[in-house]
Image (cartoon, rainbow, N blue to C red):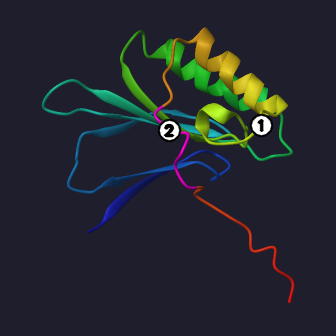
Amino acid sequence: MSWNIFTSTSNKAAIFIPQTIHKAITVAKLENTIAVKLHTDNKPITLISAYSSPIADINETLQEIQDIIRMLLNGNFLVGADLKGQNPLWGYHHTNTRGVAIMDFLLANNLFINNSSDAPPTFTRNTDVG
């Protein structure tokens, strides 16, 4: 299968769309965030992908997501983001300051988390030194 790849300006966030879907347009291309609108047979939906490195100011990426959400004027959207925030609601044992910022953002925008708190991690480091 061939893919169309849409990336943020930093190339840290991306959305892959099969080339068989011809109705995909870039809505926003920002430093840490990319948004692509798909026109489906039902309702259009905008996919938003974002990334914030652990050393970056998370508020910059949250603001980019916020700006896109405002631009959509209540349209359907789905956000997939790697924001390096920790919170028990998405599987961590504790909350860090980034997790607090993300939770505040979710609540302020009436968004829902689709993660399962008991899901396995998507990445682990091998800390065994042998």
Q: Position of residue 91 (x, y in %)?
A: 62, 42
Report the front residue among 98 and 65: 98
Span shown in magenta = 114-120
Q: Which residue is mark 1?
A: 94
The alpha-carbon separation of the residues under discs 1 and 2 comes to 16 Å
Q: Position of residue 103 (x, y in %)?
A: 67, 22
Q: Which mark is residue 86?
A: none
- Callout 1 crowding tier (Cα within 10 Å): few <14, some 14–19, many ≥20: few
Disc 1 and disc 2 in contact, CB within 8 angstroms:
no
What residue is at 76 percent from the left and 47 percent from the top? 53
What residue is at 22 percent from the left and 48 percent from the top? 21
Q: Is residue 14 above or below residue 42?
A: below
Q: Picture quarter containing residue 24? A: top left
Q: Horizontally, is 16 left or right of 105 in the view?
A: left
Q: Which amino acid type corresponds to the residue marked 2 in the rendered image?
A: Asn
Looking at the rendered image, the disc whose residue lies closer to the viewer, 1 or 2, is: 1
Report the front residue among 1 and 125: 125
Label whose residue precedes the other's in the sequence (1 or 2): 1
Q: Helix, strand, or loop for circle 1?
A: loop
What residue is at 13 percent from the left and 32 percent from the top? 41
Q: Which residue is mark 2?
A: 115
Q: Which amino acid type corresponds to the residue marked 1 in the rendered image?
A: His
Q: Helix, strand, or loop for circle 2?
A: loop
Q: Picture quarter containing residue 121? A: bottom right
- Callout 2 crowding tier (Cα within 10 Å): few <14, some 14–19, many ≥20: few
In the image, is residue 91 part of the stretch drawn in magenta? no
Give the quarter of the figure containing the N terminus: bottom left
Q: Is residue 98 above or below residue 108?
A: below
Total numbered circles: 2
Q: Position of residue 6 (x, y in %)?
A: 47, 49
In the image, is residue 116 part of the stretch drawn in magenta? yes
Q: Horizontally, is 64 left or right of 18 in the view?
A: right
